[in-house]
Image (cartoon, helix red, strand yellow):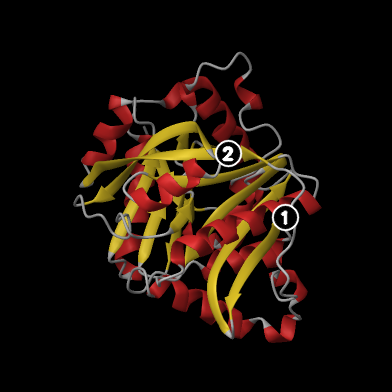
Amino acid sequence: MDVTVRSMRDADVAVADQIFRVAFGTFLGMPDPKQFMGDAGFVRSRFKADPTAAFTAELRGEVVGSNFATKWGTVGFFGPLTVRPDLWDKGVGQKLLDPVMERFLSWECTHRGLFTFAHSPKHIALYQRYDFWPRYLTAIMGRPIKEGRAPGDGRWKFSAVSPGEREPLYKECGEVTDAIYAGLDASVEVRAIAEQNLGDTVLLWEGSKLAAFAACHMGPNTEAGTGNCLIKFGAVRPGPNAIENLGRLLDACEALGAAAGCKVLVAGGNMGRLTQYRTMLSVGFRNDLVGVAMEHKGQPGYNRPDALVIDDWR
């Protein structure tokens, strides 16, 4: 087939979003595949975050698939990769992977990965062709939100910081993650949330130093969907109080979600980060969806037992 892959344009977004829903909904056997993820939205927010890292597959002038690359400093991951169901198993997915691999090289990512279905031999085989190998199971977890109490520090929300004072905070977020894995920097998620009004970011301080942060999507047309507060990325600076700070960070995210009327706090837990995963189970989180992280050359990156990171690579 004469399928070409190019950079995504704004005019492609609506069709790419529809294909994303129908593809996943069909794979999961939903009665109405178009209802996959309800009013949550992945495609538009990822396109707007970095249009140069969003790719569209086109056949005879029609959009038939898409893929997205994300750069967290030295860490890169991709997805969602989706293809129109009538074109499955025809090589379109591979064509959508090639520009992403090139982008990872240009970004000089030292760690690369993806999240996929643990029960799908087809998905796993495709990514193994590109030297990505299954590592640990990754759970998307949730716990009901109760009335939360905000931290006492008035600096606990990014939205409370005036726009002119935000640039140093992006750097501080990068310092927290760099202490976990060299060059890891997810401040792009903090920036995207602020610029696209997708939610807010929780900031946890120890004196004048940022001890932890969590970038959260909330509500419809975000990656969370109605009623949910999704921790897209969170990290705790290593130190003697790190586990305690993880609990405090989760409580602060609950307070953020409660104030916005959310009912469920959602967060990702890679089981290779065993301390973080156990801690989340101990404070009431339960597994809602379990997939697997596939990592380039089988390298663990920051998925180590001691790393206190909450993330969502879907």
Crowd tier of the residue under label 1, counting other residues whose Cα lies within 10 Å: few below 14, some 14–19, many 20 or above? many
Q: Which residue is mark 1?
A: 255
Question: Which of disc 1 and disc 2 is earlier in sequence?
Answer: 2
Helix, strand or loop at label 1? It is helix
Amino acid found under the numbered disc labelled 1: Ala
Helix, strand or loop at label 2? It is strand
| Left or right of 158 in this view: 87 | left
What is the x, y in percent for residue 287?
49, 33
Q: Nearer the viewer, residue 307 or 58?
A: 307
Q: Nearer the viewer, residue 68 or 111?
A: 111
Amino acid found under the numbered disc labelled 2: Gly
What is the x, y in percent for residue 276?
42, 52
Residue drawn at x 35%, y 47% is 97
| Left or right of 175 in this view: 109 | left
Asked whether the viewer can see residue 65, the reply is no
* Quadrant of res 74: bottom left
* Quadrant of res 117: top left
- The mark found on residue 142 in the picture is 2
| Left or right of 243 in this view: 170 | right
Above or below residue 308? Residue 82 is above
